[in-house]
Amino acid sequence: MTATSRPIGYWLRHLHGLIEAQFEAALAEDRLGRRHWQTLHLLHEGPQTSVQVADALAPFGADRGATVDDLAARGWVTRGDDGRLTLTEAGRTAHTQVAARVEAARDLLMRGLTTEQYVETVRVLATMADNLESARPAADAAAR
């Protein structure tokens, strides 16, 4: 069976599982999950409100509160007087260390691909999703 003889749904599910496993392995040393990494990386970009963190994690169904609480318990995140979440010095150090492992996982994912191929793949998948999402209101209305 060739790669193209399998439907796109197979490859999407299969790749999703592989990506989750690869990132889980990269983060396991620090007993982190992907949402921990996403929060660390978001805060590395600069202080964020709880709402900004929640919005960033919302597509993944993550419990933002538990994730932030865990990072705070590690001494990696603090809440300022203005209520914004900020990485501590220990958090910045952790981000640097974890980022190296995440980058290695991404490099493995991208092996044999150009940046242009990756960008085009994401563009095609986004277009497919947009096509189906745009048809939903009509389908939902027809079902009523």
Image (cartoon, rainbow, N blue to C red):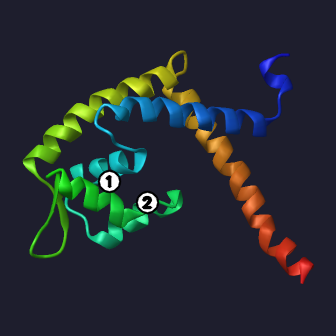
Name the image quarter holding the C terminus.
bottom right
Q: Residue at x 50, y 17 (%)?
A: 111
Q: Is residue 50 above or below residue 87?
A: below
Residue in the picture at 58% in, 28% down:
117
Q: Nearer the viewer, residue 132 or 100?
A: 100
According to the image, label 1 marks what residue? 39
Quadrant in which the N terminus appears:
top right
Q: Is residue 16 above or below residue 59?
A: above
114 and 109: which is toward the camera: 109
Residue of label 2:
57
Between the C-alphas of marks 2 and 1, the distance is 8 Å
Q: Residue at x 25, y 64 (%)?
A: 48
Specify the amino acid type for callout 1: Thr
Determine the residue positioned at 38% across, 30% down.
Answer: 26
- Left or right of 95? Residue 14 is right
Residue 140 picture location, percent across and down: 83, 76
Question: Where in the figure is residue 65, as x and y percent of width and height?
Answer: 34, 66
Residue type, mark 2 in image: Leu
Category of crowding for the residue at label 2, using alpha-carbon neighbours closer than 10 angstroms: few (below 14), some (14–19), many (at least 20): some
Residue 90 disc label: none
Whole-percent x, y for residue 17 in the image: 60, 36
Tell me if mark 1 has few (under 14), some (14-19) or many (20+) residues whose alpha carbon lies within 10 angstroms of its own: many
Where is 142 relative to 3, above or below?
Answer: below
Q: Quadrant of residue 121?
A: top right
